[in-house]
Image (tube, grey):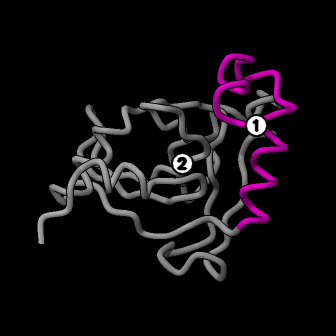
Amino acid sequence: MDIPVTLVEGSISRGDILLSEFDGIDHRKFFVVMGVSKDKVCGFFFINSNVHPAIFNKQEQLNLQYPMLHRDYEFLKYDSFLCASSVIERKLIDIAEGIKEGTTSIIGKMKDEHVSDVLEMVRTSKVISERHKKIYFY
């Protein structure tokens, strides 16, 4: 059965963990949806196995590294970190078409308490723009 893209769009929600292709990256990466507007989603990428050493001396960015444990998310090979210091907006239609074409997969959902933790972390951050906070994180 061929599912309409609009139906796929309507199924994407806050907390969805996607595995997707990104321009300029030679492999698929995890992307966590943290907000949905009329025609875009906003989230964070990537889930990394370690915090990047370049931010060890940047406390505001370091504060936006959220631990994700393998025991909570079976698809992770090991304990990892959601890098919430870089906001990415993607068109909802592009994600829906990727799901339909098979280049993007919904592989899980963040636990509600983890979504709440990340939202609180982001809302109080000086790194994330007020515009993004207003549109996606409340």
Q: Residue furthest left?
A: 1
Tell me which amino acid carries mark 2.
Val
Task: Give the magenta part as a residue range.
Answer: 112-138
Against 107, residue 100 (above or below) is above
Most frequent secondary structure within the magenta stretch: helix
Q: Residue at x 68, y 69 (%)?
A: 111
Against 41, residue 114 (above or below) is below
Q: Residue at x 64, y 48 (%)?
A: 51
- Return the x and y of residue 32 as percentages of the image width and height: 53, 51
Q: In the image shown, does 48 or 122 lie closer to the viewer?
A: 122
**Where does label 2 land, which residue?**
33
Q: Secondary structure at mark 2?
A: strand
The quadrant in which residue 112 appears is bottom right
Left or right: 27, with 45 as reference point: left
The question of residue 123 being in magenta is answered with: yes
- Return the x and y of residue 63 as percentages of the image width and height: 81, 39
**Where does label 1 land, which residue?**
138
Left or right: 41, with 126 as reference point: left
Q: Quadrant of the C terminus?
A: top right
